[in-house]
Amino acid sequence: MLEVNHIDKTFLAGTPNEHHALCDVSLHLKKGEFVTLIGTNGAGKSTLMNAVSGTFWLDRGTILLDGEDITYKKEHKRSAQIGRLFQDPMKGTAPDMTVEENLAIAYARSKRGALQFALKKSDSAFFREALADFGMGLEERMKTKVGLLSGGQRQAVTLLMSTIAQPKLLLLDEHTAALDPSAAEKVMEITNRIVKQQDLTTLMITHNINQALHTGTRTIMMNAGKIILDLSGEERENMTVPELLELYAQKNHGELDNDRILFSE
């Protein structure tokens, strides 16, 4: 489904601030696979997602999605096939437009590749039914501007916008990190349900090691722009947080000292 082959990316090359963000990274995801991605700040996690999304051109390597080479496909062209959520619940939505209008734009763009839309009664009923399934009362707030919703509600709307037309790939960039614990748990519950229902190939960044080991089917750890651990199957099922930290130390010749990760155990 997703094939990332030997990609490299250096920012500000040839300057004192040169940063080799991705170093010969290869990653293959099968159809329906749900992979969690962990690592310290600056490890290359979001840069990898940006590469897949088309935020910048690669220095080397290729990216294929469902057999199609998208390495040089523009970001807005990829968006019909790739859904993405960010940590900031306001990203990906128009806060001054209603829930219904945001959903209509996302649906029209994914189906017709354009921003123009004409909201049909059938579309409105479809949106209402999908929102009702979340159990957050959003079906009664379809005429409410997105900017007036709570963080959890906004992220739930963004999640529906990103998956409403069943993309080939879903990218989740710490999409629950900015939410309170209750809202984060609810959004994660909805996420798991949608991924399972649509059999979505999914890559999720998280700083919560426990969540990384118990969500999805596979866990990958990055450091200094490289993939240093790739856990799946029985090895992952039996892995504990202390064992993972020890394994990281062995692979990286040093302890994982990022407080944000350690406090998420």
Image (tube, grey):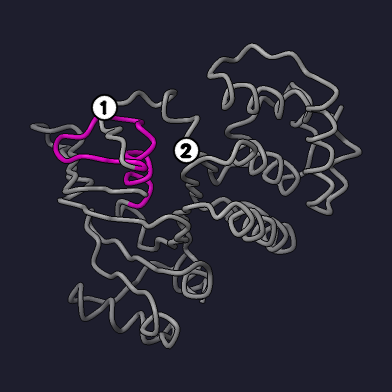
Snapshot quadrant of residue 185: bottom right
Snapshot quadrant of residue 183: bottom right
Q: Nearer the viewer, residue 11 or 112?
A: 112
Q: Within the magenta stretch, is there residue 57?
A: yes
The residue type indicated by label 1 comes to: Tyr
How many residues crowd mark 1 within 10 Å: few (<14), some (14–19), many (20+)? Answer: few
- Percent across and percent down for residue 36 are 44, 62
Residue at image coords 66%, 24% = 94
Q: Which mark is residue 82?
A: 2
Q: Nearer the viewer, residue 121 or 151?
A: 121
Q: Within the magenta stretch, is there residue 183?
A: no
Q: Left or right: 137 with respect to 164?
A: right
Question: Which stretch did the figure color magenta?
Answer: 45-66
Residue at image coords 39%, 36% = 53
Helix, strand, or loop for circle 2? strand
Q: Which mark is residue 72?
A: 1
Q: Left or right: 155 with respect to 149?
A: left
The residue type indicated by label 2 comes to: Ile
